[in-house]
Image (cartoon, rainbow, N blue to C red):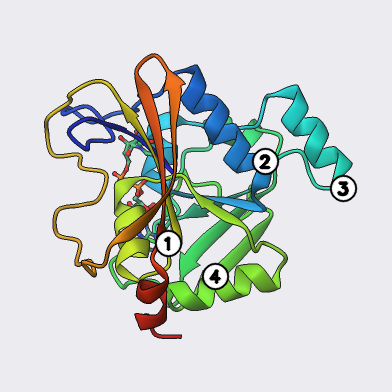
Amino acid sequence: MLAISLDGRLAPAEGGAAQLGGSGDRRALEEALAWADGAMLGAETLRRHGTTCLIRAADLLEQRRHQGRDDQPTALVVSRSGLLPAALPFWRQPLSRWWLRPDPLPPLVDQSPSDHPFPACFDRLVAFRHWRALLDDLAGAGLERLVLLGGADLAGQLLAAGLVDELQLTLCPLLLGGAHSWCPVDTRLDPGRWRLLEQRQLGDGELLLRYSRSRAEQRRLPA
Ligand SMILES: NC(=O)c1ccc[n+]([C@@H]2O[C@H](COP(=O)([O-])OP(=O)(O)OC[C@H]3O[C@@H](n4cnc5c(N)ncnc54)[C@H](OP(=O)(O)O)[C@@H]3O)[C@@H](O)[C@H]2O)c1
């Protein structure tokens, strides 16, 4: 799920932490988090923002407590480098944090940077060989419902692997230009069509669009 500009960008041309959506988008984001067991995000998004999104709405927190679930879905940080400064406010957010790391690590990754807090500040390390196996392992650990919070690098890889079942895009009424398309331009994608599930006006000129991969499309994917 992403907030994007009319020209399909998720961050300003100069890069940096994007805050595109308004209060309606925030509510839609929190509703998705309230559904989720885990919220996956790329390390660059975390480095840019310093925090991950939390559910704040009292009714959604109450709903999760009523269901016997933790207040917040587990934060699933995808990173090869593990380079996340110890000063990030993320480490003080009230939620469970897991590090998702490829196994084996690519040879050029520096595994001993002095300023990274791994693994002590994470509650769990999940090493994965490929995306499908990772999702299976997460489901085995009780995290079946996942939301993907971005950014583009991560979204592009999971889309290319055919592992995104649903797209939730908030179209925000602005043009940003620049190179930060929400799906990287070099991503190889199956051109199959997606099925519109929902369109909702969120106020302030924002439009939520929810699509699922068509059934035919899902049948074509390898198991
Ligand atoms: N508008 C929105 O809704 C929205 C949402 C999210 C983000 N954003 C914006 O998106 C931008 C960041 O996105 P991004 O595309 O640059 O980066 P990203 O997808 O957030 O993170 C990329 C990082 O994820 C890790 N990673 C990616 N693939 C991996 C793999 N296969 N195995 C292990 N680790 C992997 C790497 O971390 P390491 O470098 O640590 O190895 C990589 O540098 C920011 O400007 C942010 O504001 C916008």
User: Which label lies toward us, 1 or 4?
Assistant: 1
Q: Position of residue 56 (x, y in %)?
A: 67, 25
Q: Residue at x 50, y 18 (%)?
A: 23
Mark sitting earlier along the chain (1/3): 3
Asked if the residue at tag 2 contacts the one at tag 3, i.e. Cβ–Cβ closer than 8 Å, the answer is no
Going by the numbered disc 4, the residue's amino acid type is: Leu
User: Which quarter of the figure has residue 107?
Assistant: bottom left
Q: Residues within 10 Å of mark 4 (few under 14, many from 20)?
A: some
- Which amino acid, by three-letter code, is at mark 2? Ala
Q: Earlier in the sequence, mark 4 or mark 3?
A: 3
The residue where tag 3 is placed is: 68
Task: Locate the N terminus by quadrant.
Answer: top left
Tag 2 secondary structure: helix
Label at residue 135: 4
Question: Which quarter of the figure has residue 111?
Answer: bottom left
Q: CA distance from mark 2 to mark 4?
A: 19 Å
Question: What residue is shown with label 2?
Answer: 34
